[in-house]
Image (cartoon, rainbow, N blue to C red):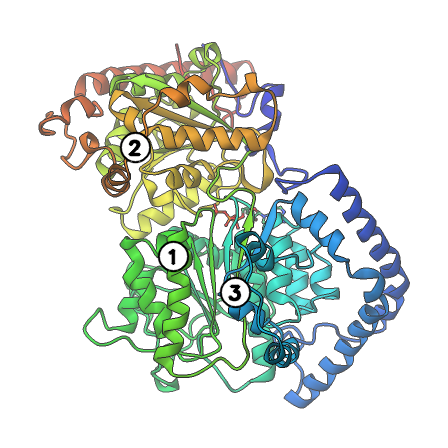
């Protein structure tokens, strides 16, 4: 047997599972590195000069309600003013040499491939800039001069913005004056450099001018969660401070799956610690809405450090379901859960959420896709505060989402019959190329001809000897995606004895899908994160948003239904700039009509990465040879996947219906019997080896994957 520890050779030292990337940014140039570090150096020097001053400030934690609460509002306000003045004075003294000119801003934003666009109608942009002060000036001006008619190019240029980028996390406090406790919590995460999306969006959302509505398209694993959570939390800290008597849900974060929602809550909890802000995961049985205080019961302290997955587990199912109401500042929810709560399971008209000032839609394109659209729009419209700001975040975003966003913003205000207290823009920020896969992973598009070919290919990935013979070396932990739940279940049964007993056997591989109970889903997520499960077979339930930091690869056992799904699935690896992740996609004869869009995505991603033409995995001849798919077929594929792989349950008896026979994942008892025999043999062999090792005083390393007996 060939033993492959996990991780193993020198080439494996760059696997995502071996640790963080030195720099999480995906796009940068030597030129901007220089410019940014020159700017940072300047600040550091100045920082040292004012450090003494800062130490004299008795309590910078003026926003914190938990750590050292101020005795009364007036006192807190006074303290705030004193400290803010001090911070501002430092900033003001340095603002001149600090702020960048447009050339510097352009250089930095361009080299990080950040593009900011004003999405409003041109007349609106010309008449109504984002800041109120400016708007007054411009309004006067516009009376005198008619807006010139611009060519398309000029219009594009007029829409383009070059806001100041965030150079380092310290600026959050020094320049954007976020709550000191929140700044500490960010610092505690140990991040050194802001990612592109953080560099671009945080100044927009925290800056001096009116907070915009924001559409963000940024690569998978690029830290969008932090980018929307920091401003949301800071806004609430300020709100608590300025309006201490107003209690209720101030922000709603919507995500398409329970797994993602619970992950956002866990991230949020690290950031809210000590700020007095509460973040809660919406659960069945909670009531929200304008019931008033009478119905609002306090929950357990939501700032507990335990993870949402662990919490879900530690509470018995009955208890979890009976939590009546949430008293929280930030509610994180899936669309249906909140719609049901606001409409008593669709038996009443939707209640409103009158205090909500920020609505974040994570994975916005899927939330506004037909599957969730109605529910998401219902939530959006139930947020009835005129100063609501929306943020739509994803790694992929069709232009239909932009149109829908514009029209919904307009309609909501029309329905409300109220105007926001100050004019604000709708901006779009794109990092890299829209709808592209991250450039820091290797893509392998593998023709397997048949279903059996795919299974054989996958087994080879699990067999170190065979894998070393091919060019694909995939190390656990990794994810395997299938098109449907029955296929995930069948594939799991097929593979579960492929891991040798001495490496943990069938407990190392699991299947996760939405037919499982919440408790089972939480268990599996927790064990995969802990590294107890190494291979997770799943459906598109886990395709989006879920952050398993160090996973080494993704296998598309069944091709994804669309190019966007490919981008999201493969983006589960290569997070935060980690190199070495692999994305393997198998395709069969039946898949050929659908492969071109995936091949195109891979091609673009490899171009983004740079390198030699010969290094490319997608050759030009293949791209030319693959057929294009009609619009209708694309739609059909997106909705139903590859037809032959659809519904009929895959059973041991082979009753999987006409046409599906060839697509069946074999779970024939023959193989299972053989594997069971192997397993029995392996257990015995392992027992013998352990006994021999114990006798020689040589204890085996159970943390390494020994691979399969060949
Ligand atoms: N500045 C940073 N430096 C290093 N790591 C970071 C930084 N910001 C965030 N991260 C980490 O990057 C990982 C990915 O972040 P996150 O889940 O927010 O990505 P995302 O952009 O939402 O991805 P997806 O589109 O897949 O949802 C997380 O583990 C997070 O802790």
Residue 383 visible in the snapshot: no
Instruction: Check disc 3: other Cα within 10 Å, few if <14, some if 14-19, many if 20+.
Output: some
Q: Position of residue 395 (x, y in %)?
A: 47, 47
Q: Which mark is residue 312?
A: 1
Distance from the alpha carbon under mark 2 to that under mark 1: 44 Å
Q: What residue do we see at 64% from left, 65% from top?
A: 182
**Which residue corresponds to the image point at 51% horizontal and 32% vertical from the top-left?**
605
Residue 594 coordinates in the image, percent (x, y): 31, 30
Is residue 496 toward the left or the right of residue 219 in the image? Answer: left
Name the residue that disc number 3 marks. 122
The picture places residue 170, in percent across and down from the top left corner, at 73, 58
Dot placed on the residue nearer the N-terminal end, 2 or 3: 3
Where's the C terminus, which quadrant? top left
- Of the two numbered discs 3 and 1 on the same chain, state the one appearing first in sequence: 3
Residue 653 in percent (x, y) is at 10, 25
- For residue 629, the mark is 2
- Looking at the rendered image, the disc whose residue lies closer to the viewer, 3 or 1, is 3
Label 3: element kind: helix
Q: How many marks?
A: 3
Q: Is residue 158 above or below residue 413?
A: above
Residue 434: tell me if it is visible: yes
Query: Hey, which quadrant is residue 34 in on the image?
Result: top right
Q: Is mark 3 within 8 Å of ligand 1?
A: no
Q: Are marks 2 and 3 in contact (CB under 8 Å)?
A: no
Give the Cα distance between marks 3 and 1. Answer: 49 Å
At x 41%, y 62%, the residue is 405
Tag 2, which secondary structure? loop
10 Å neighbourhood of mark 2: few (<14), some, or many (≥20)?
A: some
Q: Is mark 1 within 8 Å of ligand 1?
A: no
**Between tags 2 and 1, which lies in front?**
2
Position of residue 594 relative to residue 424, above or below, is above
């Amino acid at each position: 047997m060939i033993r492959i520890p996990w991780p193993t050779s020198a080439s494996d030292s760059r696997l995502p599972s071996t640790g963080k990337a030195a720099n999480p940014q995906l796009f940068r140039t030597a030129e901007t590195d220089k410019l940014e570090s020159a700017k940072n150096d300047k600040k550091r020097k100045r920082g040292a000069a004012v450090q003494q001053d800062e130490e004299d400030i008795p309590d910078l934690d003026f926003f914190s309600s938990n750590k050292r609460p101020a005795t009364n509002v007036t006192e807190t306000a006074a303290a705030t003013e004193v400290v803010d003045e001090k911070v501002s004075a430092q900033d003001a003294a340095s603002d001149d040499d600090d702020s960048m000119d447009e050339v510097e801003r352009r250089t930095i934003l361009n080299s990080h491939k950040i593009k900011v666009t004003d999405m409003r109608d041109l007349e609106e942009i010309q008449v109504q800039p984002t800041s109120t002060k400016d708007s007054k000036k411009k309004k006067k001006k516009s009376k005198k001069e008619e807006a010139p008619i611009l060519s398309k190019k000029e219009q594009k240029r007029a829409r383009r913005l070059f806001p100041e980028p965030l150079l380092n996390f310290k600026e959050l406090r020094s320049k954007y004056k976020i709550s000191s406790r929140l700044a500490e919590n960010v610092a505690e995460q140990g991040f050194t450099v802001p990612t592109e999306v953080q560099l671009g969006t945080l100044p927009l959302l925290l800056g001096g001018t009116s907070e915009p509505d924001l559409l963000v398209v940024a690569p998978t694993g690029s830290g969008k969660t932090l980018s929307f959570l920091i401003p949301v939390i800071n806004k609430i800290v300020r709100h608590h401070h300025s309006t201490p008597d107003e209690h209720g849900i101030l922000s709603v974060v919507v995500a398409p799956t329970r797994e993602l929602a619970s992950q956002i809550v866990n991230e949020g909890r690290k950031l809210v610690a000590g700020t007095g802000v509460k973040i809660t995961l919406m659960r069945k049985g909670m009531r929200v809405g304008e019931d008033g205080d009478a119905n609002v019961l306090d929950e357990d302290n939501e700032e507990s450090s335990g993870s949402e997955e662990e919490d879900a587990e530690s509470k018995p199912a009955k208890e979890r379901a009976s939590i009546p109401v949430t008293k929280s500042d930030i509610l994180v929810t899936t669309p249906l859960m909140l719609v049901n709560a606001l409409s008593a399971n669709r038996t009443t008209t939707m209640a409103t959420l009158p205090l909500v000032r920020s609505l974040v839609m994570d994975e916005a394109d899927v939330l506004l896709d037909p599957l969730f659209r109605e529910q998401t729009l219902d939530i959006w419209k139930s947020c009835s505060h005129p100063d609501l700001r929306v943020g739509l975040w994803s790694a992929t975003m069709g232009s239909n989402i932009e149109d829908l966003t514009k029209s919904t913003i307009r309609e909501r205000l029309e329905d409300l019959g109220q105007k926001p207290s100050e004019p604000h823009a709708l901006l779009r920020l794109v990092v890299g190329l829209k709808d592209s896969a991250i450039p820091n992973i290797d893509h392998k598009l593998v023709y397997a001809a048949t279903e059996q070919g795919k299974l054989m290919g996958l087994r080879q990935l699990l067999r170190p000897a065979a894998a070393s013979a091919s060019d694909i070396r995939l190390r656990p932990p990794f994810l395997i995606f299938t098109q449907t739940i029955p296929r995930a279940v069948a594939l799991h049964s097929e593979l579960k004895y492929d891991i040798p007993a001495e490496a943990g056997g069938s407990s190392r591989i699991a299947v996760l899908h939405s037919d499982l109970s919440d408790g089972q889903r939480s268990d599996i997520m927790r064990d995969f994160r802990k590294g107890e499960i190494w291979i997770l077979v799943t459906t598109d339930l886990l395709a989006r948003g879920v952050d398993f930091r160090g996973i080494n690869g993704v296998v598309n056992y069944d091709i994804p239904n669309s190019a966007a799904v490919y981008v999201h699935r493969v983006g589960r690896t290569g997070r935060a700039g980690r190199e070495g992740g692999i994305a393997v996609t198998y395709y069969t004869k039946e898949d050929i009509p659908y492969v071109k869009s995936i091949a195109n995505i891979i091609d673009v991603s490899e171009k983004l990465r740079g390198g030699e033409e010969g290094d490319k995995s997608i050759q030009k001849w293949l791209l030319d040879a693959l057929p294009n798919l009609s619009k209708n077929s694309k739609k059909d594929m997106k909705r139903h996947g590859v037809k032959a792989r659809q519904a009929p349950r895959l059973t041991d008896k082979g009753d999987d219906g006409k046409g599906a026979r060839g697509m069946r994942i074999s779970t024939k008892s023959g193989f299972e019997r053989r594997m069971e025999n192997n397993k029995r043999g392996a257990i015995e062999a392992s027992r013998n080896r352990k006994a021999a090792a114990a006798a020689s005083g040589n204890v085996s390393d159970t943390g390494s994957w020994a691979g399969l007996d060949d």
